Image (cartoon, helix red, strand yellow):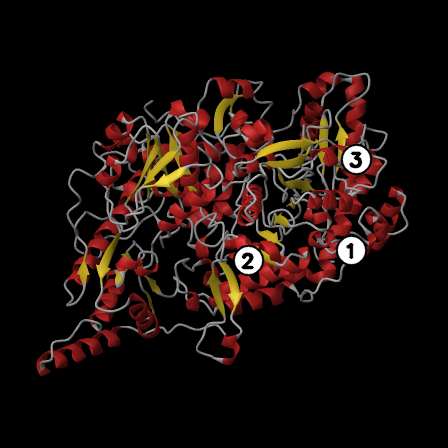
């Protein structure tokens, strides 16, 4: 594979990728002593820019290219209609500081999405502001903190986090000023009730639970877990990253969850963008609604009678924890999620969850006995965790992951969750066909054979990829974070 | 079955392989009494129907594609070159996840490495991360980082009242559980030199914005020395387009330069998705939050790129991480990269100068109107404050209804003492005709001297301006 040069390496003085208009106003004097004398941006013609980025794109793997069973990331098909919807000029070309009266269409979409998410989750109120799942978590924990403080309860300093929770949870907790207490899992992959009982006291602010958890399992004692936590005066935070398995199956608020974030970029198929933008709205019970970050969109009923009033308005909840970002949230993502929910309707949403779970269980069934699956005897939800271990060989999860690349599959998440040794976390999603799942399962079986017969083939993989394995240790030791134009 | 490919026969076969009789049997772990709720949602509609619905909703908005826009205040209406959307629409980029498998993610990784490089060039800093959610959160992370640099010994941040009010609010939201003191902006008149007087050995960071929220260019000369003498870090929030023309904060000794990257090729999108950019010095890189791409080689000694220094991050360092950030704004950083590459050295300078000249032309014309006074106490870039003879809300309503102009930002909304002050932003998107129309429209609010002759002249002038354009009224949603 020939390497693609850096954009700076195709630069030549005097080139420019776009023509801008000449000034049509008289020129003003530039501010004295404040003008920069050099700007080390590349100078590239338009065709070279297009080719550069097109060739770079071809070095990437995306859902549009093939199967992407990256556990916990819900890499489902991103419908193209969503992209068109978000680019409608009347939506995309609106300014966040416009008067609410002049953006009633935007507010109508946001209001409807708030209502949809409330209905899907069972929560009483939703804020669309958080920009990603981790920001939603942080927001939720700040809401819990504000709730306890408003009750005059400042003793609660701890957040309980099961060892099967998502990786961002501990960091989100620390940012809100809490310490974390890890709760171990039991032999069936549920929260260990005895450990939980021992940890529950009046210094606990909340539990942060991922359900289905990162083992892909629905906690068999979820109601007991929730009532144990509630009994000590603490709240239950639900990490909604795995909501794809629950659409139309169960509403987290009906189970007793108090707060949950949604990942619109997982469950509602807004694209992942190679690392964002995401969108992490937060839903809460009525008791917590006043602490939500805002502004929220409200419908003004009096406007139905008085035509001069705008129907939708923006309000800040009374005891809001404050804004978590500027403006209203990742609006473009909200439009995509709105579109997705409208196209599916209630039955369509339930079919999503059913087929996500069907696909995961089918793959689990096909791989049972091929790779160790610690909880493989249970029905899983939207994902499951196998172990990248082949008896009688020194093959690791990493080798299997890299070998999958040679077969043109994206590898599963590896080495997460941490509680499974050599984890391969597999989430097929509902949009994959049986043929694709069968092809993947066949390759996984073939790799076991290869591991036994020719392990070096796996250690050296990938062989057919834009790059061989990269030296990550060197990257961290000899830090090069910037192209060499720069004078260090 | 919308995006689900299964046939009945396949479903049957798959359930058989799993060993259950029907779909419902997969959910036996879910408590029965709350299982399978009937969701009260509108019924599914077809793709073409949802597009029609959205088009209708969109028509209830006033948008900057159809109307002249003089609104800024943290989000700016700039030209987005065609290359940007072309690249962003590539499925290989937008349907990929965070590049955890570098062998098949070199597109994203190299593009991020180039983004980091170009951000360093623009700010004249040494290190850039691969993005934050937006300008406000990048500032919050900057302040948290400054505290971390002091190893928690300093827990105060001084923040100028001329920093975007929503950024200051987000900083307070972010730090409410950390026991930090965010201060300096209580007196809305406080200047940067007033802030400097508040520096002490508990101060971790001093934050200024340039151009500040009022569009004024802050004088950064000598500031870093004073901040460093007190043992604190200088954090500068800067509009990236202004850096096409103005001396970058890196040249003034800033330790962290961050802010909103939206002006770099991202449409205003009603406030998001945007791009928080963040640059710093090499010696502070380990305290920085966010994803970072570094150069390395593969087994064949080919140059390649990987995510690096991930030991700072939440998935490895858990509760001791520099931040909880995971998904960031990858695709928006790509937009900014394509924008900077397309504009390049000369183009960005041109855009910045167009902004500067047009804003100064507008300011001069508005300042000449009776009853309107432009604040010229400090140099400005593409945004300036106008004292108006009437409430900004009233002026804006008439601008929109009668002239099809989205007027400036009503400063009285955030700063009570700035009643009747309008913050006017002018970019390369505003033609001279648009500016002249705005000026003519504002003239109608000028307190009129009562002579017959001037009245006549004013009427005539109004007629002329009306003749030159078709006023586009706003459509209201209902």
Q: Provide the secondary structure element on which disc 1 rests.
A: helix
Residue B223's disc number: none
Q: What residue is at 76 percent from the left and 17 percent from the top?
A: A454
Q: Name the residue at 47% across, 54% down.
A: A328
Q: Which residue is mark 2?
A: A335
Q: Nearer the viewer, residue B259 or B457?
A: B259
Task: Classify 10 Å Cα crowding around label 1: few (below 14), some (14-19), many (20 and above).
Answer: some
Chain under callout 3: A
Does residue A311 appear in this view? yes
**Can residue B128 be seen here?**
no
* Mark in the foreground, 3 or 1: 1
Q: Residue B33 falls in which quadrant of the image?
A: bottom right
Q: The numbered mark 2 sits on a residue in which chain?
A: A
Give how far across and how far down residue A348 sits, in percent. Answer: 72, 59
Which residue does the image show at 45% across and 40% down from the upper left?
B175
Residue matched to label 1: B34
The dot on residue A441 is 3
Rounded to the nearest angstrom, the CA distance separating label 2 from label 1 is 30 Å
- The residues bearing labels 3 and 1 have C-alpha atoms spaced at a distance of 34 Å
Image quarter in which the N terminus of chain A is found: top right
Rendered-image quadrant of the C terminus of chain A: top left
Q: Are marks 2 and 1 on the same chain?
A: no
Residue B325, given in percent of the width and then of the height, sits at: 52, 37
Q: Earlier in the sequence, mark 3 or mark 2?
A: 2
Q: Chain of mark 1?
A: B
Is residue B147 shown left or right of residue B464? right
Relative height, residue A314 to residue B241 (above, below): below
Mark 3 residue crowding within 10 angstroms, few (<14) / some (14–19) / many (20+) = some
């Amino acid at each position: 594979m020939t390497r693609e040069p850096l954009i700076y390496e195709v630069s030549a003085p005097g080139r420019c990728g776009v023509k801008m208009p000449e000034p049509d106003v008289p020129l003003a004097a530039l501010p004295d002593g404040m003008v920069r004398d050099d700007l080390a941006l590349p100078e590239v013609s338009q065709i070279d820019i297009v080719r550069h980025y097109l060739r770079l794109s071809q070095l990437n793997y995306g859902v549009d290219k093939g199967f992407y069973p990256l556990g916990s990331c819900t890499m489902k098909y991103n419908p193209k209609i969503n992209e068109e919807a978000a680019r409608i000029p009347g939506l995309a070309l609106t300014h966040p500081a416009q008067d609410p009266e002049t953006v009633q269409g935007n507010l109508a979409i946001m209001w409807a999405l708030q209502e949809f998410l409330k209905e899907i989750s069972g929560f009483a109120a939703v804020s669309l502001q958080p920009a990603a799942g981790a920001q939603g978590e942080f927001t939720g924990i700040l809401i819990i903190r504000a709730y306890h403080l408003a009750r005059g309860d400042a003793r609660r300093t701890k957040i309980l986090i099961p060892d099967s929770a998502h990786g961002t949870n501990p960091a989100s907790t620390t940012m809100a000023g809490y310490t974390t207490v890890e709760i171990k899992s039991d032999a069936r992959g549920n929260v260990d009730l005895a450990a939980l009982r021992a940890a529950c006291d009046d210094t606990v602010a909340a539990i942060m639970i991922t359900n289905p958890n990162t083992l892909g399992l629905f906690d068999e004692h979820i109601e007991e877990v929730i009532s144990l936590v509630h009994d000590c005066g603490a709240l239950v935070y639900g990490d909604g990253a795995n909501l794809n398995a629950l659409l139309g199956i169960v509403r987290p608020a009906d189970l007793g969850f108090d707060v949950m974030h949604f990942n619109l970029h997982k469950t509602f198929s807004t694209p992942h963008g190679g690392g964002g933008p995401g969108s992490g709205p937060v839903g809460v019970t009525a008791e917590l609604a006043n602490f939500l970050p805002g502004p929220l969109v409200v419908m003004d009923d009096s406007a139905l009678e008085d035509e001069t009033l705008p129907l939708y308005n923006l309000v800040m909840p009374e005891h809001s924890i404050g804004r978590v970002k500027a403006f209203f949230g990742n609006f473009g993502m909200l439009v995509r999620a709105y579109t997705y929910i409208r196209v599916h309707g209630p039955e369509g949403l339930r079919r999503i969850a059913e087929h996500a779970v069907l696909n995961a269980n089918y793959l689990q069934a096909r791989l049972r006995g091929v790779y160790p699956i610690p909880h493989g005897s249970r029905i899983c939800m939207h994902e499951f965790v196998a172990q990248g271990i082949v008896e009688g060989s020194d093959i690791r999860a990493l080798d299997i992951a890299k070998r999958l690349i040679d077969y043109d599959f994206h590898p599963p998440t590896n080495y997460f969750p941490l509680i499974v040794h050599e984890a391969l976390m597999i989430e097929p999603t509902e949009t994959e066909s049986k043929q694709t799942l069968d092809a993947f399962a066949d390759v996984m079986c073939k790799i076991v054979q290869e591991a036994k017969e020719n392990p070096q083939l796996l250690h050296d993989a990938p062989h057919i990829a834009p790059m061989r394995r990269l030296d990550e240790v060197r990257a961290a030791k000899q830090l090069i974070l910037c192209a060499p134009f720069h004078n260090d | 079955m919308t995006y689900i490919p299964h046939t009945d026969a396949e479903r049957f076969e798959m359930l058989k392989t799993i060993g259950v009789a029907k779909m419902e049997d997969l959910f036996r772990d879910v408590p029965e009494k709350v299982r399978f709720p009937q969701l009260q949602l509108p019924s599914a509609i077809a793709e073409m129907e949802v597009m029609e619905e959205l088009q209708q909703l969109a028509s209830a908005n006033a948008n900057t594609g159809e109307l002249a826009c003089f609104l800024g205040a943290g989000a700016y209406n700039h030209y987005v070159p065609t290359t940007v959307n072309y690249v962003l629409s590539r499925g290989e980029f937008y349907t990929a996840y965070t590049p955890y498998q570098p062998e098949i993610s070199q597109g994203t990784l190299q593009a991020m490495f180039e983004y980091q490089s170009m951000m360093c060039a623009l700010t004249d800093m040494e290190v850039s991360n691969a993005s934050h959610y937006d300008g406000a959160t990048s500032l919050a992370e900057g302040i948290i980082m400054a505290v971390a640099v002091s190893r928690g010994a300093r827990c105060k941040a001084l923040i100028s009242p001329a920093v975007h009010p929503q950024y200051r609010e987000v900083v307070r939201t972010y730090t409410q559980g950390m026991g930090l003191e965010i201060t300096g902006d209580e007196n809305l008149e406080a200047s940067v030199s007033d802030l400097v007087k508040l520096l002490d050995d508990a101060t971790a960071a001093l934050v200024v914005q340039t151009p500040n929220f009022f569009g004024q260019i802050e004088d950064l000369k000598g500031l870093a020395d004073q901040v460093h003498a007190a043992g604190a870090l200088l954090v500068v929030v800067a509009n990236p387009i202004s850096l096409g023309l103005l001396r970058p904060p890196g040249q003034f000794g800033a330790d962290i330069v961050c802010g909103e990257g939206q002006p770099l090729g991202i449409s205003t999108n009603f406030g998001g998705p945007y791009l928080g950019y963040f640059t710093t010095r090499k010696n502070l890189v380990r305290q920085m939050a966010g994803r970072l791409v570094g150069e390395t080689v593969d087994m064949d000694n080919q140059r390649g790129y990987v995510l690096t220094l991930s030991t700072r991050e939440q998935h490895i360092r858990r509760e001791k991480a520099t931040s909880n950030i995971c998904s960031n704004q990858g695709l928006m950083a790509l937009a900014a990269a394509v924008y900077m590459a397309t504009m390049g050295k000369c183009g960005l300078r041109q855009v910045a100068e167009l902004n500067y000249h047009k804003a100064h032309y507008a300011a001069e014309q508005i300042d000449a109107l009776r009853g309107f006074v432009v604040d010229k106490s400090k140099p400005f870039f593409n945004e300036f404050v106008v004292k108006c003879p009437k409430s900004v809300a009233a002026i804006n309503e008439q601008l929109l209804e009668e002239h099809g102009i989205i007027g400036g930002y009503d400063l009285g909304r955030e700063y009570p003492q700035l009643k009747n002050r309008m913050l006017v932003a002018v970019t390369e998107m505003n033609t001279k005709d648009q500016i002249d129309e705005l000026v003519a429209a504002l003239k109608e609010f000028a307190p009129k001297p009562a002579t017959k002759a001037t009245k006549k002249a004013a009427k005539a002038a109004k007629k002329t301006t009306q003749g030159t354009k078709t006023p586009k009224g706003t459509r209201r949603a209902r």
